[in-house]
Amino acid sequence: MSTLVLICDDSKLARRQLARSLPEDWDIKVEFAEHGLDCIEKIKQFPPEILFLDLNMPQMDGYGVLQEIQSQDLNVLTVVVSGDIQPNAHQRVIELGAIDFIRKPCDAAKLAEIIEHHGIRDRAIRESLVHKLGEQLDPEIRDIYQELTNVAMGQAGDLLARLLNVFVELPIPNVNVLEVSELHMALQAIDASASTSGVCQGFIGGGVSGEALLLLNDSSFKEVASLMNYHGELNEKVELELLMDISNILIGSILMGLSRQLDMPFSQGHPVVLGQHCDVSDLVKANKSRWQRTLAIEISYGIENHDINCDLMLLFTEDSLKTLKYKVEYLLED
């Protein structure tokens, strides 16, 4: 599926130059907007995954577009491309929700660097998957899954916060039914550019089974060690112990939270190390035989003021979907 890109600039030359500067190997469909009002209308007509936005335009400038995107809760990744290089301009657009600022004229190398730095290709894949797969689950059923997960991950976050004496940032969980190839894409989109370590732990109970997959960005280990009061040398053995500690806390508590709400006790298997210090793509390739069509619930944890990034995915087997649906439909009954 092509990624939809919208370029908004009042200059036809600037629009064409930017379009020609986008990576040639990127599967995209490019649309253009000539000013801010045109941009907002086109975002509503055919929502793009990525918006490249000029600042100085007639009718509505780039600042106005960013404000409208925020006020109307429009879901698009925005990169500002402008000749206005004042420090305050850069700061203002970031405060208004842009993910980066590129100075005009923009060359292909700089543009590729920005796209790679922010993982824009992979984030766009993720947004496309969520949009495409959204219709596979009944909205009420998805809402129940999300609420059950919200409660469970809150308990897991509370345990982690108390243990490390930090504030844990809790996201809205993503809930989707994924085919094998789509699951691989979703996993790789988590952080394709970073070295990662992963642990997987199976669970089963009451006609439901699956695996909990925890991925920790390798750049997080130093701060995790500091928060857990470990001040010795960080080697592979120590990092594995830290990874296991984090996975035990998060996986154990979230499964317990779900089992209590569903009245369905889970038995947990032994944790299995999927890989250490490898790209997510390599980790996925090495373990792809483990996964099939699945109900996937993704939770991305962060810790305020610390460079710690941790993704937890609950992967329920296809055979579990009928039992889970029965359970959540019971919760919806008056």
Image: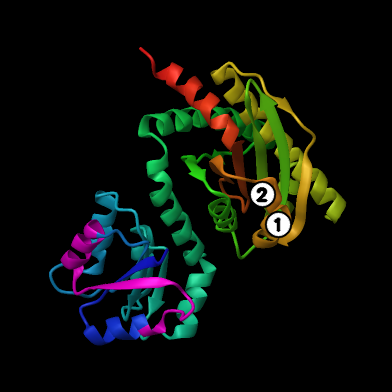
Residue in view at x 62 percent, y 54 percent:
307
Whether residue 76 is situated above or below residue 304 in the rendered picture: below
Q: At which x and y percent is residue 194? A: 64, 63
Name the quarter where the N terminus is drawn. Answer: bottom left
Location of mark 1 (residue)? 283
Location of mark 2 (residue)? 215
Whether residue 103 is situated above or below residue 120 in the rendered picture: below
Report whether residue 111 is seen: yes
Question: Circle 1 — which element?
Answer: helix
Sequence-first disc among 2 and 1 = 2
Callout 1 amino acid: Leu
Residue sitting farthest toward the top: 334
Magenta stretch holds residue 322: no
Whether residue 280 is situated above or below residue 151 in the rendered picture: below
Q: At which x and y percent is residue 215? A: 66, 49
Residue in view at x 84 percent, y 49 percent:
238
Callout 2 amino acid: Leu
The 10 Å Cα crowd at callout 2, few under 14, some 14 to 19, many 20 or more, is many
Left or right, 183 with reference to 290: left
Q: Which residues are magenta?
A: 20-45
Kindly indicate the quadrant of the structure image that contains residue 255: top right
> How many angstroms separate mark 2 from mark 1 (CA)?
10 Å
Q: Are marks 2 and 1 in contact (CB under 8 Å)?
A: yes
Left or right, 60 with reference to 88: left
Residue sitting farthest toward the left: 59
Magenta stretch holds residue 32: yes
Q: At which x and y percent is residue 123? A: 48, 59
